[in-house]
Image (cartoon, rainbow, N blue to C red):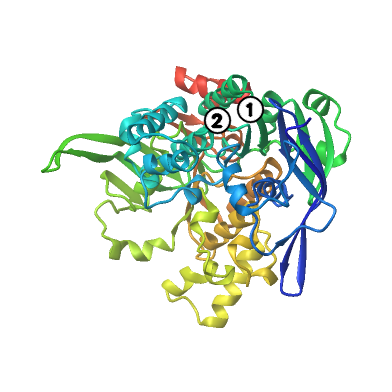
């Protein structure tokens, strides 16, 4: 008997008189100890299918008659909520896609993991603490005892994802639903985490439903693959057979959608737009009743860089290497030491009031589009908010600017009155780019803008960024752990580790002749 069996599942979302068919007649099964990969573009219905298994769909969702979800032979669609709570986090664990949105910002990491144990296990307080430490060490978080007391915002994206994995595995589930489990992780840590999940799977006999857009992960970490598009599964096959002989045109399209292309040609005599000299961001470590400073976390430690107008600089390195902190320091969003020069003017001592006029010229697109877009505002207000802040144009003029920016990134302006939760991940990221673009900036910080997107949508977003750069001579600082994406867009690359630059050069130099062992390790992880 299959551990999980889904037959003819359909899910409709009803809003007033409108009805949207998110999942249509989906059937799949998973045996005990097996890994089934569910792949497809953003908005194809992968996550809706997974959330159906756990009964986590919103009130607007409807299951037309005839569908069935059975876990160990028991019908989930007819199970009472009280019984479902016993299944969730206990027999069925889930790693959610966006850790920053899924973790409670008001509670420490230790408390959030312990809540899962308290709901389903009978541990003493000391027993819970020991189990939390074991789980954090299991997912290879360093200084686990210290991290127990940390809050989500104090961890890097990769560390937050590891915490989500620890929570999902807390009660040794029979089925683990992993919704993009390595989205926020760099290439070297991806391999470690996937290896960890595989070892635990063998140890516990756990089945895995692996939802991912990374076909490299699918190839090496699943027995079977189900390919999904527009709410339907179009092909299911053994992994090796699917990669050797894909039958459906959509499957072939997915396999051909690796990031490719080259950065735009630039003039080496173009003037410098952004520079830093010996840039440092040190966070104090305070201990004792008097909170004396006993040391520093050197997030950015003496970084020098030059970014010319119309060029793209890729910043790569493992989670916690200081990439995002470097970007925030250059935008004067965190305190730093050292020189920062923008368009010939030193801005390192500028206060927020002095920086305000420059904010029009220096924009940012964050890693997590769902977390960075206000859920209470429609797209029109989100994109146009910067125009209001800077007092640009009247209401009619601002509306036209918003429409123009949405068109530039390939979003239909007619849907500008909708809210962020009504869009797929790729659409939300395009909206975030439109929000930055509407102010007509000269420099954009792109912090992991494609990390949560499937390969086909990554390719589309890269094409949008490349076209905008060509059209408006934009300058990008592109932070990413995905070296294939960096290679497709960036002219120069800066490799960071533990807050320091270990290597920098042109994209061609870094990829063809890496000088340091660390850079070679990053490249090998990509090529595997």
In the picture, the disc for residue 172 is: 2
Residue situated furthest right in the rendering: 247
Q: Which element carries disc 2, helix, strand or loop?
A: loop
Q: Is residue 382 above or below residue 491?
A: below
Which of the 4 quarters of the picture holds residue 15? bottom right
- Does label 2 or label 1 sit earlier along the sequence? 2
Q: Are marks 2 and 1 in contact (CB under 8 Å)?
A: yes
Give the image location of residue 151, x and y in percent: 36, 45
Mark 1 crowd level (few <14, some 14–19, many ≥20, 10 Å Cα): many
Look at the image and tell me whether residue 458 can be seen.
yes
The residue lying toward the viewer, choosing from 342 and 408, is: 408
Q: Secondary structure at mark 1?
A: loop
| 178 relative position to 274: left or right | right
Residue 110 spot, x, y in % from top left: 37, 39
* Residue 206: mark in rendering: 1
Q: Position of residue 36 (x, y in %)?
A: 72, 32
Q: Which mark is residue 371?
A: none
The image quadrant of residue 218 is top right
Q: Is residue 274 left or right of residue 146?
A: right
């Amino acid at each position: 008997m299959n551990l999980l069996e889904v037959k003819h599942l359909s899910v409709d979302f009803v809003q007033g008189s409108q009805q949207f068919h998110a999942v249509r007649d989906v059937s799949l099964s998973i045996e005990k100890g097996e890994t089934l990969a569910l792949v497809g573009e953003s908005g194809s219905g992968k996550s809706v299918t997974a959330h159906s298994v756990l009964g986590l769909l919103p009130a607007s969702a409807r299951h037309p008659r005839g569908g069935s979800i059975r876990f160990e032979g028991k019908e989930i669609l007819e199970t009472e909520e009280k019984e479902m709570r016993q299944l969730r986090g206990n027999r069925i664990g889930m790693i959610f896609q966006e850790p920053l949105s899924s973790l409670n910002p008001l509670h420490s990491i230790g408390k959030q993991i312990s809540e899962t144990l308290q709901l389903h296990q009978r541990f003493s307080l000391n027993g819970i603490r020991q189990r939390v430490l074991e789980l954090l060490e299991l997912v290879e978080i360093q200084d686990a005892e210290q991290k127990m007391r940390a809050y989500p915002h104090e961890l890097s994206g990769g560390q937050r994802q590891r915490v989500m994995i620890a929570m999902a595995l807390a009660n040794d589930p029979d089925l683990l639903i992993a919704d993009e489990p390595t989205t926020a992780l760099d290439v070297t840590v991806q391999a470690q985490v996937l290896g960890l999940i595989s070892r635990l799977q063998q140890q516990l006999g756990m089945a895995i439903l692996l939802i991912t857009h990374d076909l490299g992960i699918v190839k090496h970490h699943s027995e079977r693959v189900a390919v999904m598009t527009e709410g339907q599964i179009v092909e299911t096959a053994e992994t090796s057979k699917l990669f050797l002989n894909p039958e459906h045109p959509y499957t072939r399209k997915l396999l051909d959608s690796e990031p490719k292309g080259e950065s735009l040609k630039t003039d080496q005599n173009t003037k410098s737009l952004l520079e830093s000299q010996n840039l440092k961001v040190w966070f104090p470590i305070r201990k004792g009743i008097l909170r004396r400073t006993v040391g520093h976390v050197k997030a950015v430690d003496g970084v020098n860089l030059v970014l010319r107008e119309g060029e793209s600089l890729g910043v790569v390195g493992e989670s916690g290497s200081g990439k995002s902190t470097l970007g925030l320091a250059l935008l004067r969003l965190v305190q730093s030491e050292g020189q920062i020069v923008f368009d010939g003017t030193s801005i390192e001592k500028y206060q927020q009031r002095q920086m305000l006029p420059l904010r029009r010229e220096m924009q940012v697109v964050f890693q997590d589009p769902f977390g960075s877009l206000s859920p209470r505002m429609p797209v029109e207000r989100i994109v146009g908010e910067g125009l209001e802040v800077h007092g640009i144009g009247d209401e009619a003029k601002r509306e036209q600017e918003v429409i123009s920016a949405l068109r530039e990134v390939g979003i239909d302006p007619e849907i500008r009155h909708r809210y962020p939760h009504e869009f797929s991940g790729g659409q939300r990221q395009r909206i975030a780019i439109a929000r930055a673009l509407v102010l007509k900036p000269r420099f954009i910080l792109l912090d992991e803008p494609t990390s949560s997107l499937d390969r086909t949508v990554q390719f589309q977003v890269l094409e949008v960024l490349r076209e905008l750069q060509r059209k408006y001579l934009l300058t990008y600082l592109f932070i990413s752990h995905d070296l294939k994406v960096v290679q497709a867009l960036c002219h120069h690359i800066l490799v960071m580790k533990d807050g320091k630059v270990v290597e920098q050069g042109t994209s061609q130099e870094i990829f063809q002749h890496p000088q340091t062992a660390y850079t070679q390790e990053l490249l090998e992880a990509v090529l595997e």
